[in-house]
Amino acid sequence: MSSAVAICNLALSNIGKDNISSLNEPTAEARACNQFYDLTRDLLLQSYPWRFAGKTRALAALANPEAGKWQFAYQRPNDCLKVLWLRPNYSEADPCFQTEQEEMANPYEIEQETIYANLDVAFIRYTSRIADPSKYSPLFVDALAWHLATRLAMPLTRDLKQRQGAYEVARAMQAMAEMADANETRHSSDHSTEFVTGRYHG
């Protein structure tokens, strides 16, 4: 089972640095991991519609301060890293991606934590911030460790060549992880669906 510390130790090993026992220990390695781990994780999650990070839910309606421009306003989910689509209805058979026609038919705009749309009932598919490393596939873990190694290389080694090498491996591992994710057979258990009839409240 992966953990944040285990992923950090993979990253540290990738650049030839000592492992850590805790992210809170008073070492340069732990401080660097603390500085870059969350950001690197979120950027990788945001970069691709990973199946394990996909969620679908009905949006919670808000008072609309831009009623002249948009008919409805909704609360953006707290864990939403990237919106994949907005639709007026949802079924398990819906694809994770949004077609160009759907994008034109269901436009939306995001301002901070508010999503504006012209749908009186809106379902959202989005990439969520999955902080539990046990949810990650082995290839995602490896890609994350190499991306983190890229971030750690300069503060811990000052070696630009090593950083570049780590970045090239990170890109290759991410491509492998994306390909495996795309080829994975879709099952209902692959998705975390949280919706109720009508608007979501919570």
Image (cartoon, rainbow, N blue to C red):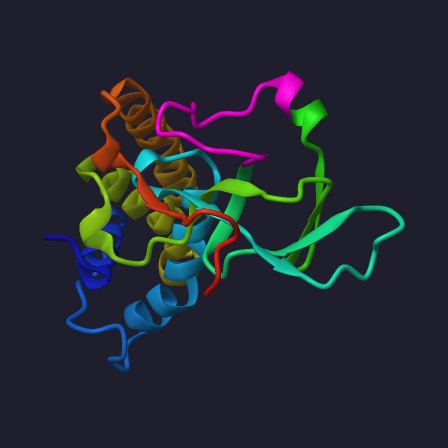
Q: Nearer the viewer, residue 155 or 8?
A: 8
Q: Examine the rendering and report whether any part of residue 13 can be seen.
A: no
Q: Examine the rendering and report whether any part of residue 168 can be seen.
A: yes
Q: Nearer the viewer, residue 182 or 199?
A: 199
Q: Position of residue 165 (x, y in %)?
A: 37, 36
Is residue 77 depicted above or below 25 in this figure?
above
Q: Residue furthest left?
A: 1
User: Image quarter for residue 5?
Assistant: bottom left
Q: Position of residue 33 (x, y in %)?
A: 34, 64
The magenta segment is 85-102
Image point (37%, 23%), residue name: 93
Asked whether, in this view, residue 7 is left or right of residue 171, the answer is left
Image point (40%, 54%), residue name: 129
Q: Position of residue 176 (x, y in %)?
A: 29, 24
Q: Nearer the viewer, residue 51 or 38?
A: 51
Queried whether the magenta region covers residue 40, the answer comes back as no
Q: Nearer the viewer, residue 124 or 35?
A: 124
Which secondary structure type mostly characterizes the magenta part of the structure? loop
Asked whether, in this view, residue 109 is left or right of residue 87, the answer is right
Is residue 90 depicted above or below 155 in this figure?
above
User: Image quarter for residue 8?
Assistant: bottom left
Q: Residue furthest right?
A: 68
Image point (48%, 62%), residue name: 201
Is residue 114 depicted above or below 30 in this figure?
above
Queried whether the magenta region covers residue 94, the answer comes back as yes
Q: Position of residue 19 (x, y in %)?
A: 17, 63
User: Image quarter for residue 183?
Assistant: top left
Q: Residue furthest front?
A: 197
Image point (24%, 80%), residue name: 25
Q: Residue furthest bottom?
A: 26
